[in-house]
């Protein structure tokens, strides 16, 4: 077997499927991997942009070097510079030791900047300078250090609109997007669903694997998959937990595709998370007013721990918003009508971990 055949097999094992959209994607990966040009990946959340970035790295000349991924939307704005470029001891409160940033740590390799559209505007200027000069300066230092890193970025946003609104620098877009690669949604590659299911099931114990009859598989092929490959992976895991070893039919799959249906009767009108209130009284009033008839009520004479009840409601709404936003903090904050930094603080308070993009 030749080296080229080995590389083809490795890429096909990483980017699963034989649909026209997936075959085109693999061909584009092979082409851009040959160069050192910056690549921007555009596509909906959950479509596998980080997997594509890793495939480009693995197919290129930097394959034996480091691959590092950072989610620009998951890091507070005041810390992103330190994360990327590093800092010196004592350069700011909490900087108890020198820290190497992602650019230095990935020397010779590939740095993947996910959700680049969420990067603060002032940081966009600093990133542009690094990409143009190929040098970095740690926070709190004056030493200029040369870096050799290939940058691949990704976004689910319409950066054209962000540029028009003055929220994203056009010059940075052109620097990051020497090549712009579109990652297809799962709805545009439904032929790959059976192969993707088999791929996810290979990672499970034999007795946890499910089978799907023809009607069930037809429903899976017709589903819209708004959460893309991430949603499909979660579906396969949910099916294995609840129906491991069984053959599932149409009704089984319909229920599994709507996991929230068993939680409570749906109310009329669109569903959206309740905004997290700064006022405890407003939050309590809203939650009690919207509580279903079977909501827990305190026993007569027993005091109500109002603070705990409010925190429980707040935590539930944070989880709802993060699920609807596919784990993207900035989008979840918008749904909750909070500042992104406020949501991050609340997530830390409750021990909520950021999901992958």
Image: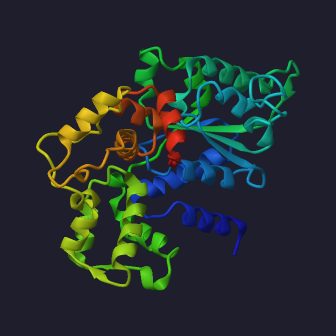
Up the image or down, 192 lies above or below 346; here it is below
At horizontal 38% and vertical 53% (from top left) the residue drawn is 228
Quadrant of the snapshot with the N terminus = bottom right
Q: What x and y, as percent, mark residue 101? A: 76, 35
Q: Is residue 141 left or right of residue 339?
A: right
Front-most of residues 19 and 143: 143
At horizontal 88% and vertical 22% (from top left) the residue drawn is 143
Up the image or down, 118 lies above or below 141; here it is below
Q: What x and y, as percent, mark residue 84? A: 71, 32
In the image, farthest residue toward the right: 143
In the image, farthest residue toward the front: 301
Q: What x and y, as percent, mark residue 300? A: 22, 51
Q: What x and y, as percent, mark residue 253? A: 25, 69
Q: How many marks?
A: 0
Front-most of residues 270 and 63: 270
At horizontal 51% and vertical 20% (from top left) the residue drawn is 168
Front-most of residues 299 and 165: 299
Coloring applied to the structure: rainbow
Front-most of residues 249 and 198: 249
Q: Is residue 213 left or right of residue 338?
A: left
At horizontal 56% and vertical 67% (from top left) the residue drawn is 13
Q: Is residue 140 left or right of residue 266?
A: right
Up the image or down, 150 lies above or below 353; here it is above
Up the image or down, 20 lies above or below 78; here it is below
Q: Is residue 266 left or right of residue 191?
A: left
């Amino acid at each position: 077997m030749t080296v080229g055949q080995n590389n083809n097999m490795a890429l096909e094992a990483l980017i699963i499927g034989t649909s026209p959209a997936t075959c085109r994607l693999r061909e584009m990966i092979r082409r851009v991997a040959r160069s050192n040009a910056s690549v921007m990946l555009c596509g909906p959340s959950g479509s596998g942009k980080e997997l594509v970035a890793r495939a480009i790295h693995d197919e290129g000349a930097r394959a034996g070097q480091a691959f590092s991924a950072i989610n620009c939307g998951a890091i507070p704005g005041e810390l992103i510079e330190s994360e990327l470029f590093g800092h010196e001891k004592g350069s700011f409160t909490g900087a108890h030791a020198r820290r190497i940033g992602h650019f230095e740590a990935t020397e010779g390799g590939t740095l993947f900047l996910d959700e680049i559209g969420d990067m603060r505007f002032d940081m966009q200027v600093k990133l542009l300078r690094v990409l143009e000069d190929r040098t970095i300066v740690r926070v709190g230092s004056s030493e200029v250090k040369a870096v050799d890193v290939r940058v691949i970025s990704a976004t689910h946003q319409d950066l054209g609109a962000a540029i028009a609104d003055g929220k994203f620098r056009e010059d940075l877009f052109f620097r990051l997007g020497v090549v712009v690669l579109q990652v297809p949604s799962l709805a545009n590659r439904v032929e790959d669903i059976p192969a993707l299911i088999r791929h996810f099931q290979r990672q499970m114990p034999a007795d946890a694997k499910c089978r799907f009859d023809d009607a069930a598989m037809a429903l899976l092929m017709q589903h819209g998959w708004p959460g893309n490959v991430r949603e499909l992976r979660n579906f396969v895991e949910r099916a294995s937990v609840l129906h491991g070893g069984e053959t599932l039919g149409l009704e089984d799959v319909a229920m599994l595709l709507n996991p929230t249906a068993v939680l409570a009767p749906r109310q009329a009108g669109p569903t959206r998370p309740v905004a997290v209130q700064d006022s405890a009284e407003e939050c309590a009033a809203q939650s009690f007013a919207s509580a279903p008839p079977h909501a827990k009520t305190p026993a007569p004479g027993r005091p109500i721990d109002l603070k705990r009840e409010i925190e429980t409601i707040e935590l539930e709404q944070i989880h709802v918003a993060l699920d609807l936003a596919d784990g993207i903090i900035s989008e979840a904050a918008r749904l909750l009508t909070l500042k992104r930094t406020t949501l991050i603080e609340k997530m830390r308070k409750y021990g909520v971990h950021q999901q992958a993009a």
